Image (tube, rainbow, N blue to C red):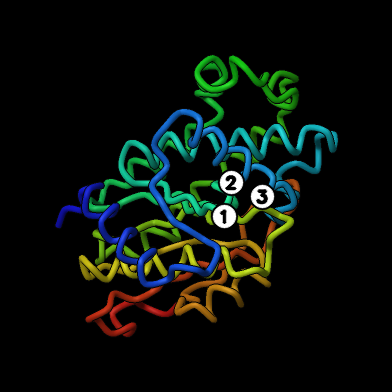
Amino acid sequence: MSLPLERVEELLKQFNQRNAGKGVTLELAKTREELEEVVQVVGRAFVDYPLYGWMLDSVSSEDYQAISIFFARYVQRECRTDGFIIMAKDDSGRIIGAAQTSHQEHSDYALLRKWHNFTAKVTQFCSMFFGRTGYPRAFRSGNTTLEGKFQCFDQIDTAHKEIMGELTHHLYLIMLATEPSLKGKGVGKTLLAALGEIADSINVPIYLETAAGHLKAFYERNGYENKRIFTIKYTGGDFSPNFSMVRPAKASSSEQLTQT
């Protein structure tokens, strides 16, 4: 079941019409300027993300922002290939939030396997993404602890495959971000509502992971069910908790997904 970008745009237009006057307008990010601004917003929003804190405990604090932006830019590139990026704008036209989403229509999990090989491709990504902003120093310095922790992404992949294995057609919400100064103002809730309508239009579930307890509660308030709590195993120190969450397809029972 396909999901053309034209259909996503039409659904967003309808959503905006129904929610006019609330101070937030949703659009697909398309231009280079929009995409770069989305990267900056996501980078700021994720700079204190708990999983990043675990990964980056061996780097200096000034590297956090650069690496957070690095992740945002990499995820954006993959979403532009097999998904879409919704940006939230305020009444002045400033981008204040974004949802970076992959459209998982097949069972090969190509996007997730690319995360596994992240460190092996670091140099390639450097030249591709950081020509203007500079490459994070932590990667240049040969930080073996950081490189080892990147390999733990296969555990996130395993949880994704085991939970969604029989429902290979779904939306994968990889990053939901709100400008830090506007958290709690309804921007994220608006993005989730629109994404839910998009998923319902083709009757598919939405899958996401979060490593923050307060975000788990936020997603639960917005129709997501926690399907698994798991720990990332690493020889130098484990990380937990990680939550795998699903918003069920509109016409299907949540019992289709195995609770583990």
The residue located at (61%, 77%) in the rendering is 217
Q: Which mark is residue 46?
A: 3
**Percent coordinates x, y for residue 251 in the rendering:** 22, 81
**Percent coordinates x, y for residue 195 in the rendering:** 38, 63
Counting other residues with Cα less than 10 Å from the Cα at mark 3, is it few (<14), some (14-19), or many (20 or more)? Answer: many
Q: Are marks 1 and 2 in contact (CB under 8 Å)?
A: yes
Q: CA distance from mark 3 to mark 1?
A: 20 Å
Counting other residues with Cα less than 10 Å from the Cα at mark 2, is it few (<14), some (14-19), or many (20 or more)? Answer: few
In which quadrant is the C terminus drawn?
bottom left
The residue located at (66%, 53%) in the rendering is 179
Quarter location, residue 221: bottom right
Amino acid on which disc 2 is placed: Arg
Amino acid on which disc 1 is placed: Asp
Q: Are marks 2 and 3 in contact (CB under 8 Å)?
A: no
The residue located at (39%, 56%) in the rendering is 172
Q: Is residue 180 left or right of residue 13?
A: right
**Does dot 1 land on a helix, a strand or a loop?**
loop
Residue named by callout 1: 90
> Compared with residue 118, is residue 142 higher up or lower down, i.e. above or below?
above
Amino acid on which disc 3 is placed: Phe
Q: Answer with mark 3 or mark 1, whichever residue precedes in sequence.
A: 3
Quarter location, residue 165: bottom left
**Percent coordinates x, y for residue 208 in the rendering:** 47, 62
**Percent coordinates x, y for residue 111 in the rendering:** 38, 42
Q: CA distance from mark 1 to mark 2?
A: 6 Å
Looking at this view, is 91 or 153 the one in front? 91
Total marks drawn?
A: 3
Viewer-nearest of labels 2 and 3? 2
